[in-house]
């Protein structure tokens, strides 16, 4: 875990308070409350998914249309003078992200989307899966993998939903080929502010809306379905584990070399189907590359099959770490189990939640109860615990150009001392319009490793754990650390996914992201004055009634002013 032996910055010792002890023994609540309820909810959700899959296409489509009409009706019931800005009716603690959903703690107008949890269609001819926004990754892989099909990008955690991955952020080890989750969507069905239902694609009259939806956090309209690209797959993932050693720059270079050389030819056998690297300390990491393999190949004599999905199996990040001792090795993992390899231990956050959860005896006796639902973990923490995690814990993703990964690793090591780190490459496409996130200008001329003429290679540096200073009992200013991280990202053309805690003010927020297309669509599709702005949604801190009124008034005045100018 975190390297607590050699601090890079001398810090004062921090005096413990009661919250420290509560967090230390929080596992008691997790064991006796969170895990049993989580298991029950997972089971009930599974039964609901099975029931949904038994319905005919016609019945699912009919229910969908009826539910869309309910959303339309609800929007038309809103009184702009008194009802507040629109958001979904999901409880704040249900969201998987760590950002406080503070906008729901002030006056707002709720629209219930809880019925939108069905896979509407698996079209094997068009290679499209049409899903409602609350369909999660576990649900979709149960439906597609038996057909030897999968979404082009399958986010690792079972509970992550289609809507969250589109409106927010989604990535997987295949993103170096297909981009982010939203890049694999071919059409959105959106309910706009006045109740109009539109289908947005990249080449129809709503193409501007199509490109503006990703990262908009549902502030342009309400997503009620999406058509997502499917790809053919095979039954197993042939996974190669390769240890890398050296300083952090050496580790970064090892990661880049694991997939980037010769990347221009996508048909090359050298390009793996999946890529990820885990950095365990400032001197050691393991690079993993995977390629789809048939069951015939996997079961050939001499090959090792590892079903990592069994409850008693070692947590995946610890299993991968064994490559540091045994050296490079290859094994075959059932594809669906590979997709969800980080679910059971929530990457490595499970070690903090249940310090003994990785022990053999716990895995065999109680591993089948894992993982705890993130929503329940949030629901069972009070304001003091929530603030403690914001100050003493880090869950951030740093999206940076591939060639800047060495600098990013040095920065994290110096400022936060957090290990393990997760590295996952993704394409950032050069699109016909400039969206909220976009490649560096002129990247196509530079053609650095991993880049093509139509996409720049980026990397998600996943920073999820307790900082080294906190482990050592030293003072750590989490707010200042996040502020410095955000400043570094802005200076290096990086991006911060909005599920995370943010300290950005509005000026800096729009310095990180581009507002042009987003604001254009906000006005064109009359979202201003109806839906919250994306910054308002992401802004940290509870909104007072005065702030709500000022936000509504300012947005309405801005919209009116722009309409007047147009006339």
Image (cartoon, rainbow, N blue to C red):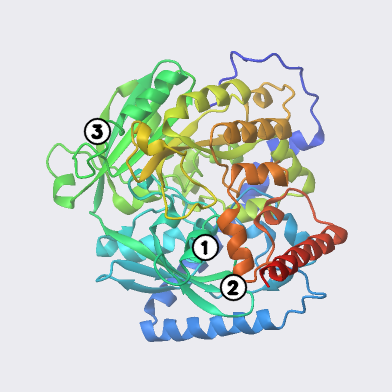
Compared to residue 11, the image places residue 309 above or below, namely below
User: SS at mark 2?
Assistant: loop
Q: Residue furthest left?
A: 301
Task: Tell which circle, 1 or 2, labels the residue nearer the N-terminal end.
Answer: 2
At 34% from the left and 24% from the top, the residue drawn is: 243
**Relative to 316, residue 566 above or below:** below
Pointers 1 and 2 in contact (CB under 8 A)?
Answer: yes
For the point 66% across and 74% down, the residue is 111
Residue on which the image places disc 2: 113
Task: Locate residue 502, reporting x and y percent.
Answer: 67, 43
The number of callouts visible is 3
Quadrant that contains the C terminus:
bottom right
Residue 262 marker: 3
Between the residue at mark 1 and the residue at mark 2, the CA separation in whole angstroms equals 11 Å
Residue 502 visible here: no
Specify which label sits upstream in the sequence, 3 or 2.
2
In the picture of the structure, the residue carrying the numbered disc 1 is: 163
């Amino acid at each position: 875990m975190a390297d607590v032996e050699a601090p890079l910055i001398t810090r004062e010792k921090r005096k413990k308070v009661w919250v420290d002890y509560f967090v230390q023994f929080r596992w008691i609540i997790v064991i006796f409350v969170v895990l049993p309820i989580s298991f029950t909810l997972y089971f009930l959700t599974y039964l609901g998914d099975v029931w949904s899959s038994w319905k005919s296409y016609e019945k699912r489509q009919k229910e969908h249309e009826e539910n869309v009409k309910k959303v339309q009706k609800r929007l038309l019931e809103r009184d702009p003078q008194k009802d507040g800005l629109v958001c979904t009716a999901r409880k704040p603690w249900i969201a998987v992200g760590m950002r406080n959903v503070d906008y729901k703690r002030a006056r707002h107008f709720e629209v219930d989307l809880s019925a939108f949890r069905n896979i509407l269609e698996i079209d094997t001819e068009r290679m499209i899966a049409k899903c409602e926004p609350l369909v999660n990754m576990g649900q979709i892989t149960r439906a597609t993998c038996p057909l030897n099909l999968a979404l082009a990008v399958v986010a690792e955690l079972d509970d992550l939903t289609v809507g969250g991955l589109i409106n927010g952020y989604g990535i997987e080890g295949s993103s170096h080929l297909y981009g982010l989750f939203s890049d694999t969507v071919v059409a959105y069905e959106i309910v706009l502010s006045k109740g109009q239902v539109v289908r947005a694609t990249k080449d129809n009259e709503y193409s501007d809306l199509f490109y503006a939806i990703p990262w908009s956090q549902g502030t342009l309209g309400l997503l009620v379905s999406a058509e997502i690209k499917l790809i053919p797959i095979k039954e197993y993932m042939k996974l190669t584990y390769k240890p890398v050693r050296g300083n952090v720059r050496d580790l970064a270079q090892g990661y880049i070399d694991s997939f980037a050389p010769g990347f221009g030819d996508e048909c090359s056998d050298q390009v793996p189907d999946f890529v990820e690297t885990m950095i365990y300390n400032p001197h050691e990491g393991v690079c993993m590359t995977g390629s789809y393999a048939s069951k015939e190949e996997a079961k050939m004599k001499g090959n090792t099959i590892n079903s990592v999905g069994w409850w008693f199996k070692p947590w995946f990040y610890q299993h991968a770490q064994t490559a540091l001792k045994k050296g490079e090795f290859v094994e075959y993992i059932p594809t669906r189990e590979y997709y969800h390899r980080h679910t059971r231990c929530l990457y490595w956050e499970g070690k903090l939640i249940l310090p003994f959860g990785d022990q053999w005896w716990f895995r065999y006796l109680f591993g089948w109860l894992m993982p705890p639902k993130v929503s329940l973990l949030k629901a069972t923490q009070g304001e003091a615990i929530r603030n403690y995690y914001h100050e003493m814990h880090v869950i951030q993703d740093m999206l940076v150009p591939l060639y800047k990964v060495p600098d990013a690793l040095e920065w994290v090591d110096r400022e936060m001392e957090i290990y393990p780190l997760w590295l996952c490459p993704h394409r950032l496409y050069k699109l016909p319009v400039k969206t909220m996130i976009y490649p560096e200008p002129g990247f196509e001329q530079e053609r650095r490793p991993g880049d093509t003429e139509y996409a720049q290679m980026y990397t998600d540096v996943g920073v999820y754990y307790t900082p080294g200073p906190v482990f050592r009992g030293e003072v750590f200013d989490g707010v200042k650390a996040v502020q410095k991280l955000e400043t570094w990202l802005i200076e290096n053309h990086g991006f911060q996914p909005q599920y995370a805690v943010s300290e950005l003010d509005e000026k800096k927020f729009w310095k990180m992201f581009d507002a042009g297309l987003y604001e254009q669509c906000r006005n064109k599709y009359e979202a201003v004055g109806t839906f919250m702005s994306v910054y308002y949604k992401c802004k940290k801190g509870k909104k007072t009634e005065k702030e709500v009124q000022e936000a509504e008034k300012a947005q309405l005045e801005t919209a009116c002013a722009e309409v007047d100018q147009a006339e």
